[in-house]
Image (spheres, grey):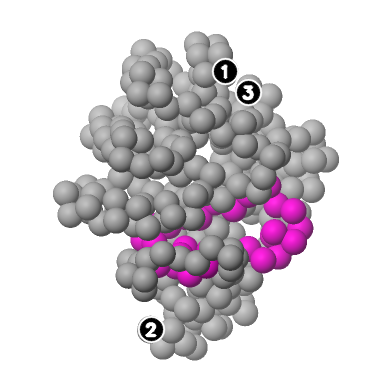
Amino acid sequence: MPIREKLGRETLFSFEFFPPKTAAGVRSLMRSIHKLETFSPSFVSVTMGAGGTDLQQKRTRDTVMRIHKETSLTIMPHLTAIGKRKEEVRSELDAFAAQGVTNIFALRGDYPAGDNGQAIRERTELHYANELVAFIREHYGDHFSIGVAGYPEGHPETPSKLQDLYNLKRKIDAGAEFIITQLFFDNREFFDFRDRCQLIGIDVPIIAGIMPILSRQGILRMCDLCGARIPASLLRQIFDASDDDVAQIGIEWAYRQCEELLREEVAGLHFYTLNKSKATCKIFTRLRQNKACSCNGECE
């Protein structure tokens, strides 16, 4: 089902996964997916590696097809533009369309450093996400419901939040129908971002990206990559806690974020699961107290 058919009718709840590199990773992912399927999410997404190499594309495609065939979930693959000729983009989209996929998350992707990055730049024909969105609309009409990324704290490569908002508006004007934000830990950043989007004329639903903290080093590494800020009060908690308590602190913080976001009528919550179900199961069990987790304590 195209995600557009769900927008505005309900508060969306969704999960993000990444394609595993090993057979064991695939088995673990599918266990997590089947557990999270019990919550009847609005959709799930599958990422593509930043460079969008042939191997990364294949892993994404294989993961998408397996979820599509083995579950009842609405699925949205990520599609990156960099490193691809237009005919290669069409080939990917044709493959998804042939399998009945009707949603795409359109991204520019990230250029690798060094000489390889320059070679990929020279090969790329669609250089920005708005160009990818426009290309999809030109060749596939309304077959795909298209989502794009938003950055409450600004994209790391953009000189100002205002410029980043103009970039986002170009994606919406090109035909994107909804926004999923980068992770954040301070809801004030999201509310300010949502207000600024309205002021600049962006009127599509904005889904909040949530990542429960599971380890100190993991979240610091992730924030370093994406530019998200961790509030001092949260930093103090996770550095004062024992290793065993960090995940519980992260889950509690994410739950409180979700509570407030839902009170303020957020369009949806999108969980970056890191291919694990335990934290998300715990949060959903509390958010949906009338729909208990069926994992019997076996969430991974």
| Residue name at image x 36 percent, y 52 percent | 33
Q: Is residue 16 above or below residue 61?
A: below
Q: Position of residue 76 (x, y in %)?
A: 45, 36
Q: Is residue 50 visible?
A: no
| Secondary structure under the numbered disc 1 in the rendered image | loop
Q: Position of residue 101 (x, y in %)?
A: 42, 27
Q: Is residue 278 visible?
A: yes
Magenta residues span 258-285
Residue 243 bears which disc, if any? 2
Q: Between residues 24 and 122, which one lies in front from this camera angle?
A: 24
Classed neighbour count for the residue bearing mark 2: other residues with Cα under 10 Å, few (<14), some (14–19), many (≥20): few
- The residue under label 3 is 175
**In the image, 259: left or right of 155?**
right
Residue 37 bears which disc, if any? none
Q: Label 1 near label 2: C-beta < 8 Å?
A: no
| Secondary structure under the numbered disc 2 in the rendered image | helix
- The residue under label 1 is 142
